Image: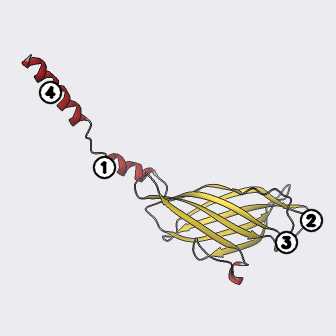
Amino acid sequence: MKKIIFLSSAVIALFFTSCTKNNDAVKEELEKALPTIEITSLGLLQQVGPFAQSDVIQVTFGGALTKAEPGVFDFAWYDAPASGTPARVDSVHFDSWNVAASTATGNNVISTTFTPSTYPNTNTFSGNLLLKLTRLPAGSKSYTLRVYAKTAGNQRATVSVTKFITVK
């Protein structure tokens, strides 16, 4: 009986000590593998084109920042020709990732929410852009949207969607 109790105690002790591992090395390696800044999504929120020049569209975006603080945020509209190089039609610069409408931003708006993630030193973000289409020429033209997110350390992530909208 004493042998059974001793063996049971030894197995239980071995089980508990083997389950208490130090995962700091794994966390550090994972952190090194993550990009500093990444935009993972860009899309329209429940709106369907074609749009009029007087419309305001709501664009959603998301991504993550690792060991970095947000810096500036820009977007640009490009024409979407059937062939050839796209030309920039309009662009707007935001000094931060939360900016109210003003004449400096062409009355466009950006708002972003940051949420801590389960990855070390990483925040996910989700944001909205309210974009006025008044500067885009009409005529059933399609436009590509590119967004540029920068960290305070000037590292950049870019994403674009070709033929994102059509202005009638």
Q: Amino acid at mark 4?
A: Ser
Q: CA distance from mark 1 to mark 4?
A: 29 Å
Question: Mark 3 against mark 1, which lies toward the viewer?
Answer: 3
Please name whichever residue, 34 or 58, is drawn nearer the observer in this view of the structure.
Answer: 58
Tell whether label 1 touches label 3 (CB within 8 Å). no
Residue 105 placement (x, y as % from top left): 69, 78
Describe residue 39's horizontal placement relative to residue 152 as left or right. right
Mark 2 nearby-residue class (10 Å; few <14, some 14–19, many ≥20): few
Image quadrant in which you'd find residue 103: bottom right
Mark 4 = which residue?
Answer: 9
Image quadrant in which you'd find residue 87: bottom right
Q: Residue at x 72, y 78 (%)?
A: 107
First along the sequence among labels 4 and 3: 4
First along the sequence among labels 1 and 4: 4
Q: Residue at x 71, y 74 (%)?
A: 108
Mark 4 nearby-residue class (10 Å; few <14, some 14–19, many ≥20): few
Q: CA distance from mark 4 to mark 3?
A: 76 Å
Mark 2 = which residue?
Answer: 139
Tell whether label 3 touches label 4 (CB within 8 Å). no
Mark 1 = which residue?
Answer: 24
Tell whether label 4 touches label 2 (CB within 8 Å). no
Identify the secondary structure beneath mark 2: loop
